[in-house]
Image: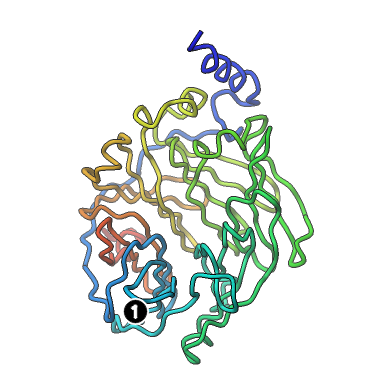
Amino acid sequence: MRAYPFILSVIILVACGQNNDNIFDAPVRNAKAIEQGSVKGERTCLSGDTIGNISGIYANDSILLLKGVEADSPFLIHAFSTKDDSAVGNFVAKGRGEGELLAPIIKGCQQKEDRSIYLFDLNLCAAFSLDIKKSVESQKTELSLLLKLPPQTLDAYPIGEDHIALVPQKDDYICEILDRNGDQIKKISLFPNVPGSDYFEGLSSACVVNQDRRMLAMAMCMLPQVNILDITTGEKSTVAISKDYKNWHKILNDSNDERRIYYTAITQSDKNIIALCMDSSFEEWIKGTKAPHLHIFDWEGNFLNDVTIQENLKTISFDDSTQILYGVDTNDSVFKYDLSDIINGKA
């Protein structure tokens, strides 16, 4: 009798899925990297006090942002110049007052030509704009509310003047496209007939948006696959690095000790998706005994490069203007990697 709930849940998931092989209900490309290589990391020496508990990083043009904790500082977002690694300001204090947020997550530039940073606050279920240029100039947090998001939103991203909200539901996991006023433009099913509100942990992904192409890439944490969604057409596709993706109904019900961890972070450029792949047991991931790889795809889903690194990174960001990848390891050290040769096929 103890096994009954588990067996029942598996039966329900298998019966409900429209494409039993792929939880994303899309054509699957089983892929191995066209090229393999390695890249050496260079540790950066950021000035100022040490930033700890870093959970987010974003690099664009000449600015590097870290989301973390600085000793005796109320601020959550710390800015540095990538030209000389100097500190240029601390912004967004924790709280509910002016210029404050509870749990900001850096989601990139609001628009490609705009230096304003898009922040999603899970606790406030809202999106905000941080004008980083004005903030650095004034040394004051220049923060404004963009919109309140739908209830239960777990993630949000900018897409031009619109917004993407990822919302788990009882019988699906929805990608909602909202206009600047928060009105729904369209709704796209991500995992049809799967109880997203019950399995949101197993369905977790590291996501990025290509604003020019209006495409969303989802590198799944518990499943060996990267999903690509065309926001305009609704067309979906999947690239899988292991045939284990077919066992999604079992994987969603595995205990933590039985699970494997695949993709834990992601970043992007105009041409590429760069995902941090652990491909390790849950125990290896927790203990940090295995360094991840960088998996580089194009936006058509071709698996271009499997790149070995030595550092145990936990979050990454790619600066398209310099083709430098920035990463933070489990000790909160910041590294940078020149990917220009690999990206341009010269490695």
Q: Which is nearer the eye, 229 or 146?
A: 146
* Direction from residue 303 to residue 330 in the image, left or right: left
Residue identified by numbered label 1: 82
- Total label count? 1
| Residue drawn at x 49%, y 45% as measured from the top left | 205
Q: Quadrant of residue 125?
A: bottom right
Determine whether 320 is above or below 84 in the image.
Answer: above
Determine whether 43 is above or below 291 in the image.
Answer: below
| Residue drawn at x 59%, y 33% as measured from the top left | 198
| Residue drawn at x 48%, y 39% as measured from the top left | 239
The amino acid on which the numbered mark 1 sits, given as a three-letter code, is: Thr
Q: Quadrant of residue 323?
A: bottom left
The 10 Å Cα crowd at callout 1, few under 14, some 14 to 19, many 20 or more, is: some
Question: How far from the left and from the top, in percent, is residue 236?
Answer: 61, 42
Question: How far from the left and from the top, in percent, is residue 46?
Answer: 27, 77
* Direction from residue 128 to residue 44 in the image, left or right: left
- Chosen colour scheme: rainbow
Determine whether 263 is above or below 83 in the image.
Answer: above
Question: How far from the left and from the top, in percent, is residue 310?
Answer: 20, 53
What SS does tag 1 mark? loop
* Direction from residue 143 to residue 308 in the image, left or right: left
Q: Quadrant of the C terminus?
A: bottom left
Task: Please identify the residue farthest to the top as the structure is shown.
Answer: 1
Question: How far from the left and from the top, in percent, is residue 73?
Answer: 38, 76
| Residue drawn at x 57%, y 62% as measured from the top left | 121
Q: Which is nearer the eye, 262 or 195?
A: 195
Q: Which is nearer the eye, 308 or 261?
A: 261
Q: Quadrant of residue 303?
A: top left
